[in-house]
Image (spheres, coloured by chain):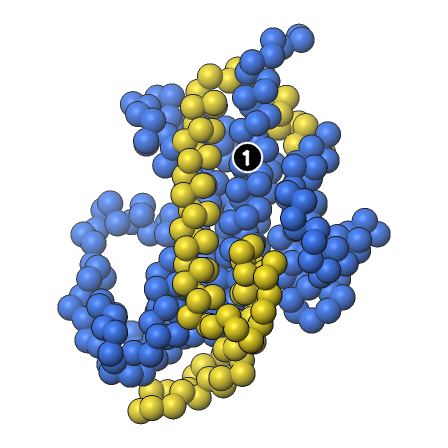
Chain colours: A yellow, B blue
């Protein structure tokens, strides 16, 4: 794939990257998204919709990680060191 | 004990056939990197959803969080600073679990080193006045002397799909200037990694809050 990238220089209208490859990647992306996966009418979901939903989903996940990390920081401030070591040993099995 | 985390996986994941197949393969104790029933798609699913990967990430996360606790107790612990430190530690642990195969993981780990240097040198490379090359995928060129950054995506010059892929590329770390298929592929891996991160942190938080309310037996 790196060979293809070095060969696809700037062109005026058409891109050297094949349309099928992009569509295939977008289909795979669509299968990851929870809302688009269950109602999979593959012909009717446009690529722009998939991409928009992907952006929203990533932003949601980022926000969830932020909330969870805040919660974890509060919890870690209150937890005993002994308990944390206990948890670590539990998780590393 | 270690199945604590795998039990909290939401049941909706088992609806799709591919993840069912890969999960059954995990029970047969096949290493996660080599098994793929279907195409490479199955390999991606296997990588971020296997229990072994989750345990791997969880242990790294706990170790990283221990270090965060040690450093933050000395400095002034405002809740936002601590939250950000936790987030960065979690992201770094996630990037390490990716084993350097993906762009975004390398970008996360590289940023950590760059920040240490940026405190000494003055920041360059930020927001150079942009040149928009009309209608072409500008990110695919590798010119080191002149960086072409797309600052404003107008609605007329770039078609819709490319515009949205650019936006997506800005969300995924390290993919601001890549070509379209690279961004899409990195995004698929990044989403799965983020989902695993959310699951691990959620179960860890529940574990900690559960042990905080209950009295320790020792």
Chain under disc 1: B
Q: Is residue B3 visible?
A: yes
Q: Residue A71, located in which quarter of the rendered image?
A: top left
Vertical comparison of A12 with A47: above or below? below
User: Is B110 or B171 nearer to us in this picture?
Assistant: B171
Q: Which residue lies at the image location 76% right of the left edge and 66% below the top edge? A: B37
Residue sitting at 21 percent across and 51 percent down? B121
| Residue at (45, 81) in percent of width and height | A5
Extreme residue toward the left, this view: B129
Image coords of residue A76 (percent x, y): 47, 23
> Where is residue B160 shown, x and y percent of the image?
35, 75
Q: For the residue carrying disc 1, how many other residues have a C-alpha within 10 Å: few (<14), some (14-19), or many (20+)?
A: many
Quarter location, residue B200? top right
Q: Position of residue B181 (x, y in %)?
A: 47, 74
Q: Give the left or right position of residue A57, taking residue B42 as reference.
A: left
> Which quadrant of the rendered structure holds the N terminus of chain B?
top right
Secondary element under disc 1, as helix, strand or loop, is: helix
Who is closer to the viewer here, B154 or A5?
B154
Disc 1: which residue? B202
Give the vertical position of B53 relative to B79 (above or below).
below
Q: Position of residue B76 (x, y in %)?
A: 29, 23
Residue B168 is left or right of residue B95, and the answer is: left
Indicate left or right for B208 with B124 as reference.
right
Q: Is residue B164 above or below residue B31?
A: below
Residue B142 lies in quadrant: bottom left
The answer to whether one can see residue B22 in this image is no
Residue at 44%, 67% in the rendered image? A49
């Amino acid at each position: 794939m790196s060979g293809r990238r070095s060969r696809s220089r700037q062109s005026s209208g058409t891109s050297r990257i094949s349309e099928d490859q992009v569509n295939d990647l977008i289909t795979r992306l669509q299968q990851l998204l929870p809302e688009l996966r269950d109602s999979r009418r593959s012909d009717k979901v446009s690529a722009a919709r998939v991409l928009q939903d992907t952006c929203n989903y990533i932003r949601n996940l980022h926000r969830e990680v932020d909330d969870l990390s805040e919660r974890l920081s509060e919890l870690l401030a209150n937890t005993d060191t002994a308990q944390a070591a206990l948890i670590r040993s539990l998780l590393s099995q | 004990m270690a199945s604590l985390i795998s039990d909290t996986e939401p049941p909706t994941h088992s609806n799709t056939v591919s993840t069912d197949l890969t999960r059954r393969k995990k029970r047969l104790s096949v290493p996660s990197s080599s098994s793929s029933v279907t195409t490479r798609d199955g390999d991606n699913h296997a990588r971020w959803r296997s229990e072994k990967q989750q345990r791997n990430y969880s242990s790294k996360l706990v170790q990283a969080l221990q270090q965060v606790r040690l450093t933050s107790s000395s400095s002034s612990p405002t809740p936002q600073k601590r939250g950000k430190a936790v987030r960065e530690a979690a992201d770094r642990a996630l990037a390490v679990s990716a084993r350097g195969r993906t762009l975004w993981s390398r970008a996360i780990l590289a940023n950590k080193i760059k920040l240490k240097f940026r405190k000494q040198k003055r920041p360059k490379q930020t927001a150079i006045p942009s040149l928009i090359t009309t209608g072409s995928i500008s990110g695919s060129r590798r010119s080191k002397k002149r960086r072409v950054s797309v600052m404003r995506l107008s609605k007329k010059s770039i078609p819709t799909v490319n515009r949205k892929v650019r936006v997506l590329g800005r969300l995924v770390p390290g993919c601001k200037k890549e070509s379209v298929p690279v961004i899409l592929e990195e995004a698929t891996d990044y989403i799965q990694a983020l989902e695993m991160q959310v699951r691990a942190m959620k179960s860890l938080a529940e574990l900690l809050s559960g042990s905080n309310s209950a009295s320790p037996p020792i």
